[in-house]
Image (cartoon, grey):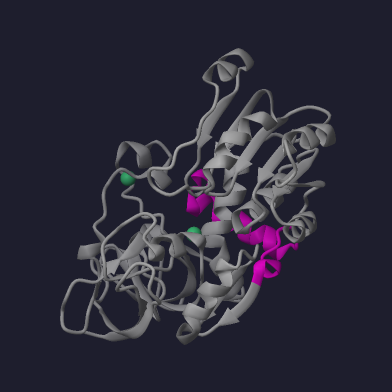
Amino acid sequence: MPQIKAAVCHEFGAPLTVEMVELRAPQTGEVEVKLDAVAICHSDISFADGAWGGSLPAVYGHEAAGIVSAVGGGVTGFNIGDSVIVTLIRACGTCPSCAGGKPTICGTPYDGDKGPLSTTDGGKLHQAMACGAFAEKVVVDQSQIVTIPSDMAKDAAALVSCGVITGVGAVVNAAQMRAGQDVVVIGAGGVGLNAVQGARIAGARRIVAVDMSEEKLEIAKQFGATDGILATNSNPWEAAKQALGRGADAVLVTVGAPQAYTDAPNYLAPGGKVIMVGMPASGAASTYEAGNFASAGQSMVGSKMGDVVIQRDIPWIVDLYGQGRLKLDELISNRWTLEQINEAIADTKTGSAKRNVIIF
Ligand SMILES: [Zn+2]
Ligand SMILES: [Zn+2]
């Protein structure tokens, strides 16, 4: 079986090990993609730290772009040599969620322990998030990839596959924001900045970014935030309401802090929605007064991966980037080699708003 280089997690909380692994050829409905770039997402770090459990040893990485290098039987619409974005959104196409237009919550389970990866001695190697993209190549289901223009830079393209669609989609698909509405984005990290630019593109009147860091608030303004409020102030929602003149029609929680969820309803206007994007560790809980939601006609909406349909939403996001209307290059803080992945992860953990990208 062909061997590739991958960064493997053997133990939660320990550095990843860059080593040779085996990647079997694509089977029916699958494609092999030779990666040019993979970004490091906070979800990769949460998994590697053990926050969400899961099988070990494992290969993480799920924000990737590259070139189709082999196709299995029954693959339609993709050819060797196509430039593609690889996502973790593996959709069977026929379950009630997929058939109902919600592929991000596909109900058909996928067992990454039985995926295309194995150790060089034939042992189990978990393909995390149906991707395993901290590796030179991936074999994924054809539902997970979208063709992009061959001249689009792959480092920018890789970002689209998770942080960008999650943030932009949370505004456009989950909040169903219409032009003129007011938005609060809690957390100005990778997903938060994309929620900000999603709100800008969708025509928000005011976009208030809330974060613990003054520096991140400044970056959020470059992405379209009209106002920035420090979360370390007491009752920051009062300053947000002052900036808006009212509460927000949509409050997007893009961080995984339980306290952010407890605070989020305080920012809402009557009829407003809290869009729940960030994922606290398993078992973490937040509190809210249910009666307030009933009396003010408010709601909380969970949004996974921006509720996107990748074949519909990635082409327009890529086109907006090409027109200069959606920022991607500005989201990249640094570029690294696969051998430097632990340094890149450490740098990401320092809380930078931007993405570190591994270039192959
Ligand atoms: Zn991600
Ligand atoms: Zn499905």
Q: Is residue 61 above or below residue 97?
A: below
Report whether 151 appears left or right of 284. Answer: right
Q: Is residue 91 visible?
A: yes
Tell me residue 37's x, y (percent): 51, 76
Residue 180 shown in magenta = no
Q: Residue furthest top?
A: 295
Residue at coordinates 62% horizontally, 35% vertically from top-left?
264
Residue at coordinates 63% horizontally, 77% vertically from top-left?
334
Span of residues in magenta: 306-332
Out of 265 and 24, give the one closest to the viewer: 265
Report whether 124 appears left or right of 198. Answer: left
Out of 357 and 209, give the one closest to the viewer: 209
Out of 59 and 4, give the one closest to the viewer: 59
Report whether 131 appears left or right of 322. Answer: left
Q: How many marks?
A: 0
Tell me residue 169's x, y (percent): 57, 46
